[in-house]
Image (cartoon, rainbow, N blue to C red):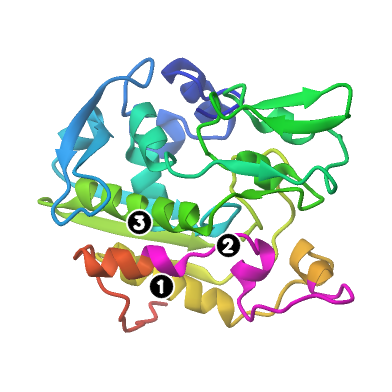
Amino acid sequence: MYPGSRKNAIEHLYCAWENGFTPLSAGCPVIIGDGLKGTDDIAVPVSGGEYVKEAKIGRAVMDADIFISLTHFKGHEMTGFGGAIKNIGMGCGSRAGKKDQHSNGKPEIDGAACRGCRRCLRECANDGLVFDEQKKKMTVNYDNCVGCGRCIGACNFDAIAFAQNAAVKELNCRMAEYTKAVVDGRPSFHISLVCDISPVCDCHSGNDAPILPDVGMFASFDPVALDQACADACLRQKPLPDSQLAEAMAEPGFRDLHDHFDNANPNTEYKSCLAHAEKIGLGTRSYELETVK
């Protein structure tokens, strides 16, 4: 599903250890929730689900009596930002569950804008991209493409975009429903670290420096309220000088969408995720902030 060292549990563990997440540093075992090859999952009914009736969740995740999430809040090349809902819904889905969430959208490549640099090719783990040696342009193999959108974030020339806006909205809604499957029926608590707010996902090899200043740590029993509060806090910040976002906003003809995450990744949006999450009863977008010192 993803490139790099995350194709099975062994590679996941090595990746975790290399990034400092060991049993000694974390104070608890590191367990890959969907088994050795990402196939150990369980079908979990989604109460009120409109897009997903049964979510494919890693079995070890559902074996837990209590669910606690810890999220790095940042921008994202497909969903606008990656917060608690993204972390839980996509993160707890098995390999099949991740594909289920990505199932609706496939990208298109603008041949006129494509430079043939092949940067996007390095981000594809599914043989979904093919380089046309004669035209020196990238093309999409729609039989293999799973719609993960990593190629979109890799392109520096805006040559790749989803063929339909509905693809992003449906992904957002499916993520919300997967999150509901994970947290329903048991105690849960959620923590988000709003710091080092990068323009795209942490796992993206082409990620850049933070676009916004550090804000702090947020926590809630409600993942929807948590994501809304984190987003609102970010929108009150001023883009960091010389960041990817600040440089883009300074370009002549820049179209200001009056939202840092929309400006950082104009082909994305996140509001449909929060709206759908609230609609299906995952939580509420209303919140009160209490500062703890």
Would residue 35 appear left or right of 153 to someone viewing this image?
left
Residue positioned 57% across, 30% down in the render:
142
Q: Position of residue 229 (x, y in %)?
A: 42, 75
Tell me which label, 2 or 1, sits earlier in the chain. 2
Q: Which mark is residue 228?
A: 1
Element on which disc 1 rests: helix
Distance (Cα) linking label 2 and label 3:
26 Å
Mark found first going from the N terminus, 3 or 1: 3
| Residue range corresponding to the magenta coloring | 249-273
* Secondary element type, mark 2: loop
- Asked whether 234 or 70 is in front, the reply is 234
SS majority, magenta: loop
208 over 242 or under it: above or below: above
Residue 213 got which mark?
Answer: none
Number of residues whose C-alpha sits closer than 10 Å to that of mark 3, classed few (under 14), some (14–19) or many (20 or more): many
Residue 258 in the magenta stretch? The answer is yes
Amino acid type at circle 3 is: Cys
Q: Which residue bears the numbered disc 2?
A: 195
177 or 188, which lies in front? 177
Q: CA distance from mark 2 to mark 1?
A: 16 Å
- The amino acid type found where label 2 is placed reads Cys
Mark 3 element type: helix
Q: Quadrant of the C terminus?
A: bottom left
Residue 126 % position (x, y): 57, 23
- Point out the frontmost of discs 2 and 3: 3
Query: In the rendered image, which residue does mark 3 sit on?
Result: 173
Of tags 3 and 1, which is closer to the observer? 3
Residue visible at 51% across and 69% down? Answer: 216
Residue 64 shows in this picture: no
Query: Does 36 appear in magenta?
Result: no
